[in-house]
Amino acid sequence: MPIATEQLEAIDATLATAAADHAAVSALRQVAPSLTAIRCDKADMQDETPFRTYENCDLFLIDAREHCVKITADPSIATGLVVAPKR
C-alpha cells in the first residue's frame, strides 16, 4: 500500500520539530499505522540518501516487499520508515 500524500504531510508535521527519539517513532506509528517505524543511528545510514531531512533527523523509506529490506526513495513501494537523529 503506497504512502498517501496525507500520510506524508502528517509524517512531515510529526518530524518537523521532533527530537528523533522513541516518542517520535511512537508518534509516527500513530499517524502511519500501516507502516513499520523504527529509529536507527545516523552512522548506520551514512551511505544512504535520506528521503526527507528535518532539523533534528533524517527520514528514510524502506521497502520490505521481498526477502531483503532495502532503502527506497519511492513512497509508492515503501513499507516502513526509518528515523535517524542528526546528532
Image (cartoon, rainbow, N blue to C red):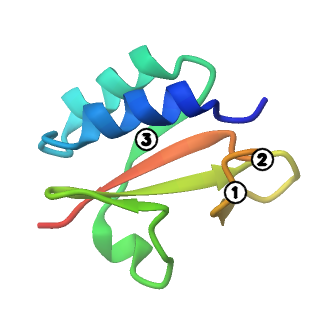
- Percent x, y of residue 29: 43, 22
| 7 or 49, nearer to the observer | 7
As measured in the structure, the alpha-carbon distance from the residue carrying label 3 to the one carrying label 2 is: 17 Å
Q: Amino acid at mark 3?
A: Ile
Q: Which mark is residue 77?
A: 2
- Percent x, y of residue 63: 72, 51
* For residue 17, above or below residue 72: above
- Percent x, y of residue 78: 69, 46
Q: Quadrant of residue 4?
A: top right
Mark 2: few, some, or many residues within 10 Å (few <14, many ≥20)?
some
**Label 2 near label 1: C-beta < 8 Å?**
yes
The quadrant of the picture occupied by the N terminus is top right
Which element is circle 3 on? strand
**Label 1 near label 3: C-beta < 8 Å?**
no
As measured in the structure, the alpha-carbon distance from the residue carrying label 3 to the one carrying label 1 is: 18 Å
Q: Amino acid at mark 2?
A: Ile
Mark 1: few, some, or many residues within 10 Å (few <14, many ≥20)?
few
Q: Earlier in the sequence, mark 3 or mark 2?
A: 3
Which residue is disc 3 drawn over? Answer: 38
The quadrant of the picture occupied by the C terminus is bottom left
Which element is circle 2 on? loop
| 64 or 5, nearer to the observer | 5
Mark 3: few, some, or many residues within 10 Å (few <14, many ≥20)?
some
Q: Amino acid at mark 1?
A: Asp
Q: Which mark is residue 74?
A: 1
33 relative to 75 in the view: left or right: left
Q: Quadrant of residue 5?
A: top right
The residue under the point 16% across, 39% down is 18
* For residue 2, above or below residue 16: above
Which element is circle 1 on? loop
- Percent x, y of residue 68: 79, 59
Q: Quadrant of residue 13?
A: top left
